């Protein structure tokens, strides 16, 4: 189950940071907001934490929307009028921080974000279908295939169970608003709801799933409960087995370094090299890295290329200065099936 978190952190991708920020904000909600006593000190903590979160993670805006709704639910449940007034301080700071972040950084990224949203909608369907697919997405590997159909139902049972417990209701409100905000942004074409972009929602899904499992085991007769527990174990064990094997022999999704060593050992005069669109970024890294020893000297001397940069994430990383090195384009690679699943 931890595969996507390890994968994206190892790739220096922001999606693992999204999960970390989400967990930190939810923990803060439980420790600071979801308590009978809430005052200026708690409001100050929320102010700084939320204002910083939007600069670390784009989906933090959805999480803060859920926290805000959950905080209001807590104040209403405790009839804490002073707390409601105090919440205006962090809410204003969050909006101001998000506005500044949008103007300074996010506004220029909206075109790429819109393209990603269109791609996920075209490939996977509507945002709520993408959310359902989270339980069976091979990229996230949340559960074993046997749990694909039943997992969302058990998670829904868990959510209903949380609502039935008054002290859990503000937490469920926070999670529900976070979910609705994410789906709403997806329907408006402002956020791609699918795969790695919704990785930050996995803690919420797992929480509801665990609550549903516990509730079902407690509600069923002893024999049926034991059978259900064994079924849950059978579903959980295969992913754990895979995680154990990955711990011993970690997966290498883009193992470029041995390829470069292979080319360096066999490079001959008159050879030509085709670099696929996706591989050019790793090649540039090894070309510019002076201490990682990834590129053999004889291959480095043969590659007559220069670096290239741009604002878009699809900007070519290298430009060839010789016919002996051909840098592939994204459209050309796709037409030959390179990099396709």
Image (cartoon, helix red, strand yellow):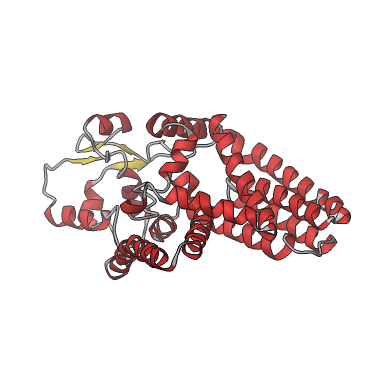
Q: Name the quadrant containing residue 324.
A: top left
In the image, is 312 to the left or to the right of 272?
right
The vertical placement of 119 against 168, above or below, is above
Up-down relation of residue 110 to residue 88 (above or below): above
Within the image, what quadrant is residue 170 found in? bottom right
Rendered residue at 21%/52% (across/down): 299
Question: Would residue 40 be visible to someone looking at this image?
Answer: yes
Residue 200 visible here: no
Residue at (67% x, 45% y) in the render: 65
Displayed quadrant of residue 22: bottom right
Seen from the viewer's position, the closer of residues 321 and 9 is 9
Quadrant (top left, top right, bottom left, bottom right) of the N terminus: bottom left
Residue 145 x %, y %: 31, 51
* Closer to the camera in the image, 116 or 255: 116
Q: Is 89 positioned to the left or the right of 322 in the image?
A: right
Numbered label tally: 0
Q: Residue 154 in the image: state x and y as whole percent.
A: 47, 52
| Left or right position of 140 against 90 | left
When the figure is inspected, residue 118 is found, relative to residue 95, above or below; the finding is above
Name the residue located 67 percent from the left edge and 37 percent from the top edge: 103
* x and y, in percent, of residue 66 in the image: 66, 48
Residue 34 vs residue 245, the one in the foreground: 34
């Amino acid at each position: 189950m931890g595969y996507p978190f390890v994968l994206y952190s190892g790739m220096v991708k922001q999606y693992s940071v999204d999960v970390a920020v989400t967990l930190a904000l939810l923990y803060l909600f439980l420790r600071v907001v979801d308590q009978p006593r809430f005052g200026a000190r708690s409001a100050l903590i929320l102010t700084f934490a939320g204002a910083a979160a939007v600069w670390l993670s784009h989906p933090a805006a959805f999480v803060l929307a859920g926290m805000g709704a959950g905080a209001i639910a807590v104040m209403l449940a405790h009839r804490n009028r002073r707390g409601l007034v105090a919440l205006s301080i962090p809410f204003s700071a969050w909006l101001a921080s998000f506005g500044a972040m949008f103007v300074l950084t996010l506004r220029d990224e909206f075109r790429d974000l819109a393209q990603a949203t269109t791609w996920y909608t075209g490939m996977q369907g509507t945002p709520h279908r993408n959310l359902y697919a989270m339980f069976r997405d091979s990229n996230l590997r949340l559960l074993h295939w046997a749990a694909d159909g039943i997992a969302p139902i058990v998670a829904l049972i868990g959510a209903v169970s949380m609502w039935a417990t008054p002290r859990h209701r503000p937490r469920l409100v926070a999670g529900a608003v976070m979910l609705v905000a994410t789906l709403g942004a997806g329907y408006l074409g402002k956020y791609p709801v699918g795969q790695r972009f919704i990785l930050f929602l996995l803690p919420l899904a797992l929480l509801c799933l665990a609550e549903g499992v516990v509730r079902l085991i407690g509600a069923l007769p002893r024999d049926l409960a034991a059978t259900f527990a064994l079924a849950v174990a059978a579903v959980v064990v295969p992913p754990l087995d895979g995680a154990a094997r990955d711990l011993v022999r970690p997966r290498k999704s883009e193992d470029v370094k041995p390829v470069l060593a292979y080319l360096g050992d066999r490079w001959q005069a008159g050879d030509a090299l085709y670099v696929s669109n996706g591989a050019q970024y790793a090649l540039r890294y090894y070309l510019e890295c002076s201490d990682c020893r990834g590129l053999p000297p004889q291959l480095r001397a043969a590659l007559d290329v220069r670096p290239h940069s741009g604002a878009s994430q699809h900007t070519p990383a290298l430009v060839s200065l010789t016919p002996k090195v051909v840098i592939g384009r994204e459209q050309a690679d796709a037409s030959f099936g390179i990099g396709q699943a």
